Image (cartoon, helix red, strand yellow):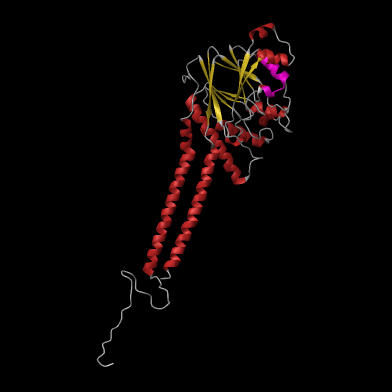
C-alpha cells in the first residue's frame, strides 16, 4: 500500500497496571523474588511463634503465680484476729480436711501420673504455706484422710506418702501439728477393713489415734471416729478424761457426730462435754449444734443431774477439703481463734479452683494449634498463587 500510513497499535493496559502476559506460560519467580517471599513468610511465622510464646508465658504466670495472690486478697480472717504469737489469751488455728495426697495404685501410671501427683502436691503446698505465713497459727489440725491410698499402700509406697506429706505441709517447730486418721489412712469404708496393722502403721508415722493435745488454754480431744460405715475400736474415754485440764475443750474427729453410731456419739459428748467439735470426711462446709442431754436421752443413756440442768450445747463445724482432686468446687481451710473465755470466731478461706486454670491451658493449646494451622494454610495458598504470575 503505497503512501499508506501504517499505525501500529500498542497493546492496551490498565492505568498503572501490569503488562498483559504473552501466551499461557506462568511467570516464574526469580531467585531474588523467591528469597524475598520466603523471608516475608518466615517473618510472619516468627511473629506468630513469638506471640504464642509470649501469651503462653503470661498464661503460665497467671495460673501458677498470680492466681494464688489474687485469691489471697479475698481471704477474710475471723473478727478480732490476733497475729501476735505472744498473745497467750488467743489460740490461732488452721484446720484442714481431707488433703488426700495422691497415690500410685489408683492414679494414672507413667509420666501422666507423675505430672498429676506433682501438680496436686504443688497446689496443696502453695495454698497451705500462703495461709500459714498469713495466720502464723499456734496449731495446725488435719482431720484425717491425709493420704488417698494409705490403707492399701505397700510399705514402700507408705514411706513415700509420709515423706511427701511432711514436705508439703511443713510447719515451724513452734507450731503444733495435730494429725487425725481417716478411712483412707486406716480403712473403714466399703470392703477396706480397719486392721490393727493399719492403725499401728499410722501411729508410728504420724500420731496416736486417740489423745489429748494442749494448746494454751484449750484441750483438743482426738477421737478415732473414722467412718460411719464400720465400727472403729472403742474410744478410751477414761484415759483421755484423765488428761483433761484446760478450761476449753474441742473435740476432733474424722466423721461428723451425726454420722457416727448414736450411742458412740452420745457417750463421747456426755464424757468430754466439749464446747466445740470439728470434723471432715464429706468434703463440704456445714454447721450443726447438739444438745448433749437430749442426745444422751435419745441414745437411752443415763446422764447426771448437773448435765440436765446446764443444757450444754456442742457446736460442730464440718471442714471442707483442701484438695482440688476431691470432685468439689468448694475448696478451703478454716481459720479459727479461741479466746481465754472460750469464745470462738471462725472463717472459711476459699481457695482458687485449679480445674479452671487447667481448662485455661487446654483452651490456650487449642487456640494455638488452630491458629498455626490457619497460618500455614494461608501462607501455602499465597505462595501457590504468587508462583502462577
Residue at 48% across / 34% down in the picture? 68
Residue 259 is inside the magenta segment: yes
Q: Quadrant of residue 270?
A: top right
Q: Nearer the viewer, residue 177 or 300?
A: 300
Residue 344 is inside the magenta segment: no
Q: Nearer the viewer, residue 7 or 277?
A: 7
Q: Quadrant of residue 177?
A: top right
Residue 326 seen by the camera: yes
Q: Up-down: is 91 above or below 16? A: above
Quadrant (top left/top right/bottom left/bottom right) for the N terminus: bottom left
Give the mark count: 0
Q: Which stretch is magenta?
A: 258-269
Residue at 68% across / 24% down in the picture? 259
Q: Position of residue 152 (x, y in %)?
A: 69, 35
Quadrant (top left/top right/bottom left/bottom right) for the C terminus: bottom left
Q: Nearer the viewer, residue 122 or 170?
A: 122
Horizontal relation, residue 181 to residue 64: left or right:
right
Q: Up-down: is 29 above or below 260? A: below
Residue at 57% across / 43% down in the picture? 115
Residue furthest to the bottom in view is 2
Question: Is the stretch drawn in magenta largely helix, strand or loop?
Answer: helix
Q: Position of residue 363 (x, y in %)?
A: 52, 46
Q: Position of residue 55 (x, y in %)?
A: 44, 46
Horizontal relation, residue 327 to residue 74: left or right:
right
Residue 224 seen by the camera: no
Q: Position of residue 222 (x, y in %)?
A: 64, 20
Residue furthest to the left in view is 3
Amino acid at each position: 500500500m503505497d503512501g499508506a500510513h501504517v499505525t501500529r497499535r500498542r497493546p492496551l493496559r490498565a492505568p498503572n497496571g501490569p503488562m498483559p502476559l504473552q501466551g499461557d506460560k506462568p511467570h516464574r519467580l526469580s531467585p531474588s523474588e523467591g528469597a524475598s517471599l520466603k523471608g516475608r513468610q518466615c517473618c510472619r511465622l516468627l511473629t506468630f511463634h513469638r506471640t504464642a510464646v509470649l501469651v503462653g508465658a503470661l498464661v503460665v504466670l497467671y495460673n501458677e503465680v498470680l492466681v494464688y495472690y489474687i485469691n489471697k486478697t479475698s481471704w477474710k480472717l475471723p473478727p478480732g484476729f490476733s497475729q501476735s504469737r505472744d498473745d497467750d489469751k488467743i489460740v490461732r488455728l488452721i484446720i484442714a480436711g481431707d488433703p488426700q495426697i495422691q497415690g500410685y495404685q489408683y492414679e494414672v501410671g507413667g509420666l501422666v501420673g507423675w505430672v498429676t501427683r506433682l501438680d496436686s502436691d504443688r497446689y496443696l503446698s502453695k495454698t497451705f504455706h500462703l495461709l500459714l505465713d498469713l495466720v502464723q497459727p499456734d496449731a495446725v489440725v488435719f482431720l484425717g484422710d491425709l493420704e488417698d491410698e494409705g490403707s492399701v499402700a505397700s510399705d514402700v509406697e507408705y514411706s513415700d506418702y509420709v515423706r511427701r506429706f511432711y514436705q508439703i505441709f511443713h510447719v515451724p517447730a513452734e507450731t503444733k501439728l495435730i494429725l487425725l486418721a481417716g478411712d483412707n489412712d486406716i480403712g473403714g469404708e466399703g470392703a477396706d477393713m480397719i486392721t490393727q496393722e493399719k492403725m499401728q502403721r499410722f501411729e508410728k508415722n504420724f500420731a496416736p489415734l486417740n489423745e489429748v493435745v494442749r494448746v494454751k488454754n484449750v484441750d483438743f480431744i482426738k477421737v478415732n471416729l473414722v467412718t460411719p460405715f464400720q465400727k472403729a475400736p472403742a474410744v478410751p474415754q477414761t484415759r483421755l478424761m484423765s488428761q483433761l485440764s484446760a478450761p476449753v475443750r474441742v473435740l476432733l474427729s474424722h466423721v461428723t457426730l451425726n454420722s457416727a453410731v448414736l450411742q458412740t456419739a452420745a457417750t463421747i459428748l456426755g464424757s468430754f462435754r466439749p464446747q466445740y467439735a470439728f470434723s471432715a470426711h464429706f468434703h463440704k462446709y456445714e454447721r450443726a449444734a447438739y444438745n448433749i442431754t437430749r442426745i444422751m436421752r435419745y441414745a437411752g443413756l443415763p446422764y447426771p443431774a448437773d448435765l440436765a440442768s446446764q443444757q450444754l450445747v456442742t457446736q460442730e463445724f464440718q471442714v471442707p477439703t483442701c484438695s482440688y482432686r476431691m470432685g468439689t468446687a468448694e475448696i478451703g481451710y478454716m481459720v479459727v481463734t479461741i479466746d481465754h473465755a472460750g469464745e470462738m470466731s471462725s472463717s472459711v478461706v476459699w481457695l482458687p479452683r485449679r480445674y479452671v486454670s487447667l481448662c485455661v491451658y487446654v483452651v490456650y493449646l487449642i487456640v494455638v494449634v488452630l491458629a498455626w494451622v490457619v497460618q500455614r494454610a494461608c501462607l501455602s495458598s499465597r505462595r501457590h498463587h504468587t508462583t502462577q504470575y
